[in-house]
Image (cartoon, coloured by chain):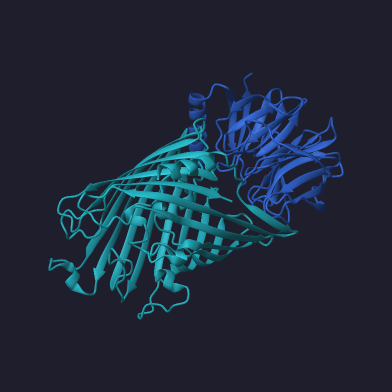
Amino acid sequence: MRLGILIVLGVALYTKVNAQFSISSYNKNLQISGYVVGFYNQRFYDAAETNRDKNRFNLDFAVIRFQAANERRIRCELQVNLPAIYSTDPTDEFLMQATAEYRNRKNNFYVQLGYDKLPFSWASMLPQNESVFMQRAEAVRGKTFNRRDMGVTVTKGFWNKRMKLIGGVYTGEGINSITGDNDPNGKFLYAGRMEFGFPAQYRIEEIDDNQTAIPRCLLGVDGAYSEKSVTTGVDYPILTVDGKKKSYSTDATVSWKGFSAHAEWIQFRIEPNDTAVLLGKPTDYYLAQGVILQGAYYSKRLKSTLALRYDEFNPNDLVLGDNRQTLSLAYNYLLDGMNNVIKVHYFHRLQAENALQPWSENQLRIGWQILF
Amino acid sequence: MMRLLISMFGMMTSFLLNAQVEVLKRMPLRCSEPSDIVSSPDGKSYYVLADKYRICEYSASGEIVSTKDMQSLDVEGVCFAGNKAFISEETLQRIHVMDATTMTELYTIPLHHGGGRNQGVEAITWIAADKTFLMSTEKNPQFFMEFDTSMNLQKTFQIDGIGEVSAMTYSEGHVYVLSDEDATLYCLNEARNAIEKFWKLPVINPEGVCYKGDGVWIVVSDDAAQWVELKLMN
């Protein structure tokens, strides 16, 4: 195993890749790009554990992305992740984006139709290949809400996009929205985000790779609402809910001279039609909620990023102490920016008292990401 | 109020953080997404590319004098050569050639180099002494291209220490290269094959640069939509 990792690191060190190619024809352009991320995962099992199937090599992403744009400011984007064809994990999605978009001339008003990420939660909207970490926090991994959906999204920027309002209406069925029918009640999911960057617009970025000389911050507030008649979800039965699901999130991000920090709070208020899931408590709803706190430092001289993240998720507040808490330490060695990067992510599980089931063991993930 | 706050914040932090550069003035541009600035051939006004499709003419004091719209997707770099202005369009990889007096489009020149749509020809400048256009891609990969007056590619090259470029300008025998990601202005040597000196700029996302005279430089900030006048310390 060690030899394998050394070989991979050795090859990476002598490989300089350059991302993205495009073809232009007078007033239109097609860009072809993509990325591949492979990793080795070592889980530190209890001595008594007999099934150690998580110790493995894995192809996390093999993404191909086509982006077309023309002079009339019509854009189309198609993005697929090939390994997901073979995956049984519902958080692995083959189709990542298929959208058509119009932008106005001032580039501060967009209308997008298609399948894409919902405008909900900064940590969900951050592209995975731009993250120091190799896995998202538990509350936003795709087990608690459908991160992508089919619908219409409208974005409007104000004050040179320092403030952005993003809102949309979606089928609410996630990947099943592409060709399948809606929920029997035929109702939609509504989601929106308002964000404010100061002193300038602030894109959703985890690391301060510009090492900005002037401190910057971003504040965001998100909300989503759906009312469905079928409950789904593999680990947590809140992906869609038979009843009302009200989702809220708020986040703050700051960066300065290579340092960046992010805090996010996410809450799902579940008002089920089936009161049996309320465990006999005198209430008509329960809460699932998560917290993400993280900080990172990017050193251009050392071509490195070091990041620490604490995240917790409580899938049901009616169950005392049912908290999943993880401390993550991540290190990226950037051979050629994020185009060619070695990523190391250590998950240290902080097991909570009275949890319904044991939390996963600690694990170490070492990966290599190449963009083209 | 917002502009005042931003201006005060910028002045304060630049004073505290940077001794290489003296910031003389910050003011709002009153146009969004500025991508380059160039002084007019007579030196009396300045042209800023804005909103991805608009040319805004400013007076020396930074007031908008006139605006002109173009049929383009994202214009990124501008320079004057003779009686023409040359504007690079990044995504569609072409050069718009304009009449320097009226700033109306005469024709376009395709300039395909195959790079990503957001990493096309980001910067262009005219080196009058050599009768050469110098252009640069933004990044991934960043490289410089020299063209003759007929827009024939003469050579491509890279310079150690420069990995990302947002604008270029030529002044008093030297090419100055601006990097927005590094917030740095580089002065190349006369042979244009190495960095002679550089300055870290207290400007967010600097996208355009030109020399105003009397040691004063103008830098435009994209994300903050600001006009910043500064002096560089040697």
Looking at the image, which is closer to me, A62 or B63? A62
Comparing B45 with A315, the one in front is A315
User: Above or below — where is B97 with respect to A210?
Assistant: below
Residue A316 coordinates in the image, percent (x, y) = 22, 60
**Depth check: A127 or A20 in front?**
A20
| Residue B139 visible at all | yes
Q: Which chain is blue?
A: B
Q: Please provide percent x and percent y for residue B55.
A: 71, 47
Look at the picture and state if A105 lies above or below B1. Answer: below
Rendered image quadrant of residue A110: bottom right
Q: Residue at x 49, y 31 (%)?
A: A302
Q: Is residue A38 left or right of residue A278?
A: right
Left/right of residue B117 with respect to residue A309 in the rendered view: right
Residue B4's place in the image compared with A284, above or below, is above
Please name the residue shown 59% across and 36% down the image. Answer: B27
**Residue A208 appears in the rendering:** no
Q: Residue at x 66, y 40 (%)?
A: B142
Q: Colour of chain A?
A: cyan
